[in-house]
Every structure is written in C-alpha cells, then in structure tokens.
Amino acid sequence: MRAERSSWMEFLFTAALILAAFSPLAVSCATTVLRLERTPVPLNSSAGVEKISAQDRARHARLFSGVANFSVYGSADCELYGIYYTKVKLGSPPQEFSLQIDTGSDLLWVSAKTCGNCPRSSSFRIELRFYDAAASSTAKVVPCSNKACPTRCTENGECSYKINYEDHSETDGYYVVDRIYLDSIQPDSTIATSSAPIVFGASTYQSGELGDSALAVDGMFGLGHGPLSPISQLSSEGVIPRVFSHCLKGEGLGGGTFVLGEISEPGMVYTPLVPAQPHYNLDLQSIAVNGELLPVDSSVFTTSTGRGTFIDSGTTLAYLVEEAYEPFISAVTAVVSPSATPILSEGQQCYSVTSSVSQVFPAVSFNFANSASLLLKPADYLHQSVMDVGGIWCIGFLKKPGVTILGDLVLKDKIVVYDLVHQQIGWTYYDCKINKTI
C-alpha cells in the first residue's frame, strides 16, 4: 500500500530517537509468531473474479504512488472475498486490535477513540475497537516539541501524520509510543509473553476504502522495510530478528501462520531483493511452461520506474506483465488442447475439462536470480470458474501493464521468508493447512 509521503517522511528516520526518549528496553531477542486471520465474506455466494480483481486494482493503486505465532484465516479461493489480518495487543492494560497485514506499507496504525468518521461496524463480522491513549498507563503521545517531530501538528500540540493513498483513501492522526505484546516460543517450546515500546499512529480520520464498513478492520500492520515499520523498529531494539515469514493455507477457508522471525525448513531457495525499492521486488528472469521457456525478453520483468516484479501477500490473485501474458496463455493452451476446450469466461481464459486438472495442465516455473525457481502446480495458477459448479477451470493470472505481481494465488501452501538482514526472499512448498507449530 503506497502512500504519498510528505513532511511525515522525516519522522521515519527518527523513530529510534523517540523510543529512546520515552522508554528503555530490556527484552531479549526472540522470534515472534503472530496469529493471522482472514475473514472471508461471501458476496451473494460468489465474489467472482471481477469483484476480486477490482479489490486488487484498488490495492495496486495504493501500492504504486525465543518465536511469536499467529494463526492465519482466509483463502485465495475466488469465491471468497477477504483480507488477512492479525490480532495485536497494544497499551496497558493491553487491548486487542484486528490489523490488516500489509507488505506494501510501513506504519502500524489503529483507529483512535476520538475518530469521528471511522467505521463502527464491519462486514467481516469483526468487533471494531478504538485505541484510547488516555486509558493506557504506558502511552506517550509524541508532542510537536519533540525534536524528531516534523512541523505538522494537531490543534492539541500532538505530532501528527497524514497519509494519502493513490486510490484517494486517506488516514490522518497522531503519533504515539505504547507497548506492543508478543508471544514468543522459547527453546523449550513454552510460550513467553513480553512487551516492547513501539511508535505507531492513532487514526482520527479515514476516508475512501479505509472508511468503508465493507472492508473495515481496526487498522493496518505495515510490513514494509522502511524505518518506521514494526519490523524495523523491533529488530533495531533487539526484540525480534529483521526477518518475517508466512505460510498461507490453500484449501477451505484457508488460514495459516505469520511469523516475526524465520521459519526454517529444508529445501528453501532464496533470491536477492532488488535494492532501494519500496516493495519486495525480485529479479524475475524467465517463465517456463512444461519445461519450455516463453519467448519473452527478460527486460519486461526488470524493475524500473513503473515496472517490475514483486511479491505481495495483500493481492488475492496474480498478475502478469502484458508482454508475457499472451505467450503464457498460448503455451498453456497448446499443452492442454488435446484434453481441454478453451473458452472465455468473465474475460478470463478458461478451459472445459473432463479429467483431473493435475493430469491435464502443465507445471509452470518462474525463474529468478540466483537460480531460484518458484515451481507452480496447476492448483497454483488455476481456479474453478465461479459460474460453474465443475468442469470449467480458469487461469488465475490477469494481464497488467508494466508489472508482474505474485499474490496469494501462487503464495499459498508455501513457506515464504522475507530476510531483510541478507536482503533476500526464500520459499519452499509446505502443507500450511496442517495445524502445528512451524
């Protein structure tokens, strides 16, 4: 979720100064596993591809301008419409908030009690809660007099922020320092709860999709790699390593695990992050269908202004840059043509299939720098048509100018590790639906 950053950008580089000024930290480094939930909302029993892609388009408009364990709920199923969120406790006494997980933004913010236009109900059937700094004994509102605060202030003398997203959504509020609570898995597998101070935003105004009850949660948990992100703040203070991971379930109502730390699993492959980018951009070099490389110049995947390839767990589907889309469709169609009939449904390339898709459709490989290949089974790039109870399967990739985005459709049933220490992302297949500690 990319925001237009103005004077508050200066504040990002001074978060550590604010933390040092308000509260000492004495906690040991551990890996934190957060419980993630994703609430699917049936829309007339089927969201449909157009509804899901509309949700993704709105998100992309925003994008472009001891271990703590949290279970994940949700699905990449196109018949379900949801967002991933985790429950985070803030303040003293701790209050639990449901925060959307967003790898495309940095700031953690929650709706404030003083917000006059924030949603009061949610279609996700989440009980919305509002942060009250006055009710927390450990809260410290960041004043304008703090040397780290930019010139923007509220009428009450609070250091404030304003974030305008490129889809015209907006959140305004003020900065506060308070405690965040983390359940850590210790070496002996016991759970220990600790807390640490963190700078976050208390939102007093929301507009656009942020103010819509249909998509309402309590706030945002930014997982970007900027200096104000919770990952950067907590790792700089030695609370967690500068690594996070997720494992998203791909069947039923989905779910999974989100970890502030590294999930270790044999068979992990890693590829470097493209440096100096606001998102998790990767160097995609080629795509192969059934072992044959697509006739596409690798430059169409290269990161430049308005172009590139990146991973985004907040995107439901997946998107191929337009220069690669038609060759991809043609290659798949050529392989399946003896056993499947190509048809169009809702503008998507679909196929009428009478036998098992795993036997008919080819394997696909996305080949990245460092010889790291992301191997996709048919279930990783196909979805069953929402217009048919069976027999019609559609390509889950949509065409997009300039960029390739790997969303939940291809990330499901894999451990994905964002290693910011070594500036790399890794993955391996894993049965994320198994209910066990990773």
Image: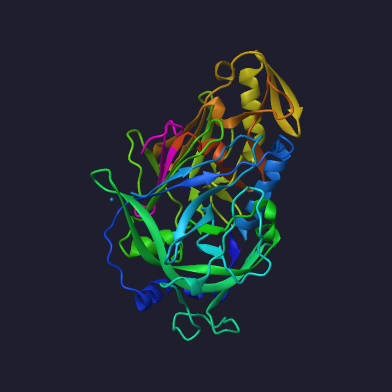
Q: Position of residue 339 (x, y in %)?
A: 65, 13
Q: Residue at x 72, y 32 (%)?
A: 348
Res 225 visible: no
Quadrant in which residue 263 is drawn: top left
User: Is residue 126 or residue 245 the one in the foreground?
Assistant: 126
Q: Residue at x 68, y 43 (%)?
A: 53
Relative to 20, 105 lies left or right: right
Q: Position of residue 9 (x, y in %)?
A: 52, 72
Q: Position of residue 103 (x, y in %)?
A: 51, 53
Relative to 10, 42 lies left or right: right
Is 210 drawn above or below residue 48 in the view shown? below
Q: Would you say residue 433 sits in the magenta stretch?
A: yes
Quadrant in which residue 414 is drawn: top left
Q: How many marks?
A: 0
Res 267 visible: yes
User: Is residue 297 or residue 235 the one in the foreground?
Assistant: 235
* Residue most extreme to the left: 188
Q: Residue at x 32, y 65 (%)?
A: 237
User: Is residue 108 or residue 5 the one in the foreground?
Assistant: 108
Q: Would you say residue 431 sits in the magenta stretch?
A: yes
Q: Which image quarter holds the N terminus?
A: bottom right
Looking at the picture, the colour scheme in use is rainbow
Q: Which image quarter holds the C terminus?
A: top left
Q: Position of residue 116 (x, y in %)?
A: 67, 70
Boundaries of the magenta span: 415-438
Q: Residue at x 46, y 52 (%)?
A: 274
